[in-house]
Image: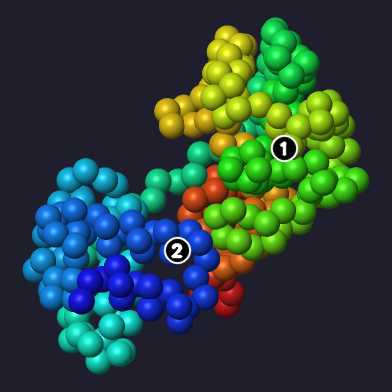
């Protein structure tokens, strides 16, 4: 029996969001590509799966390997519950070690340099916007909303009511509401007045081009963009500043997370915003 057929039965029983469903399909397809034939129940064997995970580990980062492992073992568990395959031995499956580097956000000073650079960015777009208007709005939106880039790109004018943004997060399918304040709202008005379907009325490639020009100006004025940082770092910056004021729980709410504070701490909030961990009272001075 093909695993892709089993997956259809699994999906019919579970309330999966579209991203999890896509991940399961992708993992089964990649497993089959490795096997050089469509993956079947008979391929659910610890040595076989371990060779596949080792193969992926040579080409992808540990979080990706872990994601594929979770997908396959989820289907494996479900098939075992149906008495269709044997249970796997977790001790015999390849362990995937993931080390998370501390999140790196920009400081408020750095972010203000970026905003100042946006204000003087020369150029004009075909839609009628000045480049400075576009990138000022992009910087303000990224910092004040804490939205993922994909969610920002999908925003529609009707998603904004006063200063309140109400969105359905693309990654999780969870609704999220955030107050972006009067300044970010004012910065978005020229974009909304263009009358496009989306609030950011330019193609992704166009936005990427102007973002690179923005960074070039900012870096000439002392802005420090580290390797692998991009405009999406504003999400971390906003979350870090919220955590500095209101703690991790406030940062998680700002980010639209529903599962507690661990994701915010691990991936978004710079450690310096969390302060020092309290220590127990002294046993000596307490006497």
**Picture quadrant where residue 89 is located:** bottom left
Residue 20, labelled with which disc?
A: 2
In this rendering, position of residue 186 left or right of residue 278: right
Residue, x 84% and y 37% (percent of image)? 185
Along the line of sight, which residue is nearer the eye, 187 or 260?
Answer: 187
Residue, x 85% and y 28% (percent of image)? 193
Disc 1 secondary structure class: loop
**Image x and y of residue 81, in percent:** 31, 89
- Report the colour scheme: rainbow
Residue designated by label 1:
198
**Image x and y of residue 116, in percent:** 73, 18
Q: Is residue 175 above or below residue 164?
A: below
**Image x and y of residue 53, in percent:** 19, 58
Mark 2 vs mark 1, foreground winner is 1
In this rendering, position of residue 84 left or right of residue 184: left
Residue 166 at least partly seen: yes
- Give the mark nearest the N terminus, 2 or 1: 2
**Picture quadrant where residue 4 is located:** bottom left
In this rendering, position of residue 19 left or right of residue 241: left
State the CA–CA distance, disc 2 to disc 1. Answer: 26 Å
The quarter of the picture where the C terminus appears is bottom right
Decide: few, some or many residues near mark 2? Use Cα within 10 Å; few <14, some 14-19, many ≥20: some
Q: Is residue 239 above or below residue 184?
A: below
Residue, x 70% and y 7% (percent of image)? 122
Disc 2 secondary structure class: helix
**Picture quadrant where residue 108 is located:** top right
Q: Is residue 142 above or below residue 80?
A: above
**Image x and y of residue 216, in percent:** 56, 13
Q: Is residue 149 above or below residue 56?
A: above
The quarter of the picture where the N terminus appears is bottom left
Decide: few, some or many residues near mark 1? Use Cα within 10 Å; few <14, some 14-19, many ≥20: some
Along the line of sight, which residue is nearer the eye, 24 or 2?
Answer: 2
């Amino acid at each position: 029996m093909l695993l892709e057929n089993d997956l259809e039965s699994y999906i019919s029983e579970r309330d999966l969001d579209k991203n999890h469903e896509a991940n399961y399909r992708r993992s089964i397809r990649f497993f089959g590509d490795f096997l050089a034939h469509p993956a079947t129940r008979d391929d659910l064997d610890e040595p076989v799966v371990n060779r596949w995970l080792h193969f992926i580990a040579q080409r992808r980062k540990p979080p990706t390997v872990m994601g594929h492992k979770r997908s396959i073992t989820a289907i494996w568990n479900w098939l075992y519950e149906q008495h269709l395959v044997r249970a796997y031995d977790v001790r015999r499956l390849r362990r995937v070690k993931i080390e998370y580097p501390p999140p790196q956000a920009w400081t408020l000073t750095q972010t203000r340099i970026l905003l100042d650079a946006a204000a003087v960015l020369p150029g004009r777009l075909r839609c009628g916007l000045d480049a400075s208007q576009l990138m000022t709005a992009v910087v303000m939106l990224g910092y004040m909303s804490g939205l993922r880039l994909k969610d920002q790109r999908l925003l529609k004018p009707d998603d904004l009511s006063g200063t309140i943004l109400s969105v359905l997060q693309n990654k999780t399918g969870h609704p999220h509401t955030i107050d972006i304040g009067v300044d970010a709202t004012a910065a978005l008005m020229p974009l909304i007045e263009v009358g496009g379907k989306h609030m950011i009325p330019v193609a992704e490639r166009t936005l990427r081009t102007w973002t690179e020009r923005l960074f070039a100006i900012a870096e000439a004025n002392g802005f420090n963009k580290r390797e692998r940082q991009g405009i999406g770092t504003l999400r971390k910056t906003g979350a870090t500043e919220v955590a500095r004021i209101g703690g991790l729980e406030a940062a998680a709410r700002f980010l639209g997370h529903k599962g507690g504070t661990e994701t915010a701490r691990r991936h978004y909030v710079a450690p310096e915003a969390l302060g020092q961990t309290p220590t127990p009272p002294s046993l000596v001075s307490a006497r």
